[in-house]
Image (cartoon, rainbow, N blue to C red):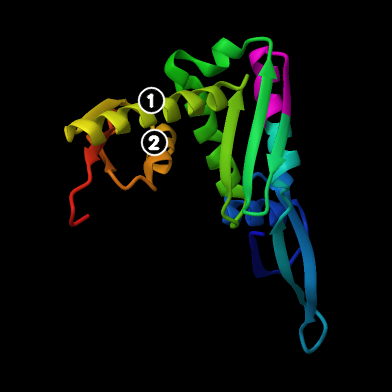
Amino acid sequence: MKSIKFETKSMNESTLNDAAKELRVNKAYVDLEVIEEKKSILGLNKSYLVEAKVDFDVVTDTIAYLKKIFDDMGIDAMVEAKTDKENHVKFLIESSENPILIGKNGRTLEALQNLIRNYVNVLTDERHMIIVDVGGYKASRKKQLEILATKTAKEVAKTHIEAKLKNMNSYERRIVHMKLSDWRDVTTESEGDEPNRYVVIKPRTKDQ
């Protein structure tokens, strides 16, 4: 949980605004707690030692944030989340406009996922792996990429000729790398510059 401690002469809206500015979050997520009240020797002046904490729940607050985005877009959508012990959070979306939210080659979905990752990272110091999927697009894409990776790897292992796959985003490249990470006959590398990076599947040499 993100938090800061500071001393202030008053507890008011301005104090809350200053804390939110320091934490770089919306003040709606900030809770203030007085840790100690300090008085001068004559008791004429006093100040407060305050702790400001970011009150944020990754699942419930992110679902609410997503729903607001879709409401503003005029899109009726259902959002649910799945989590595991490794701080992996997957947000599953079903909407009346899935194709719009996915976009050409998944680009809109990728932008949406980056938006949510940034949103979560700003509000918490904990590291989370955030995945956003719309209409099962990423689950289906994952299967397709794993089939492509396996088929191409078999061909490379047979011919000993490296193969270059089409341009992929970082999430898709990771799927290919993970699928072939245990193969003894081939190795994978990402090459090129964003947004045109791609995976090359190469025959593994004896010294690799």
Q: Is residue 186 left or right of residue 84?
A: left
Q: Is residue 74 visible?
A: yes
Which residue is located at x 57 percent, y 50 percent? 24
Of the residues tagged 1 and 2, which is closer to the observer? Answer: 1
Residue 77 lies, in percent from the top left, at: 71, 18
Looking at the rendered image, the quarter that the C terminus falls into is bottom left
Q: Residues within 10 Å of mark 1 (few under 14, many from 20)?
A: few
Looking at marks 1 and 2 on the same chain, the residue that comes earlier in the sequence is marked by 1
Residue 187 lies, in percent from the top left, at: 28, 44
Residue 129 lies, in percent from the top left, at: 56, 46
Q: Is residue 69 left or right of residue 101?
A: right
Q: Residue flagged by tag 1: what amino acid is it?
A: Leu
Find numbered disc 2 in the image and state the secondary structure of the residue it sits on: helix
| Residue placed under numbered mark 1 in the picture | 148
- In this rendering, is residue 162 above or below 49? above
Between 143 and 86, the residue placed more toward the observer is 143
- In this rendering, is residue 120 above or below 43? above
Q: Residue flagged by tag 2: what amino acid is it?
A: Val
Which residue is located at x 68 percent, y 32 percent? 65
Which residue is located at x 31 percent, y 32 percent? 154
Between 163 and 28, the residue placed more toward the observer is 163
Which residue is located at x 67 percent, y 59 percent? 1
Q: Residue 176 shows which numbered tag?
A: 2
State which region is magenta: 66-79
Q: Is residue 193 visible?
A: no
> Residue 34 occupies which quadrant of the picture?
bottom right
Q: Residues within 10 Å of mark 2 (few under 14, many from 20)?
A: many
Distance from the alpha carbon under mark 1 to that under mark 2: 9 Å
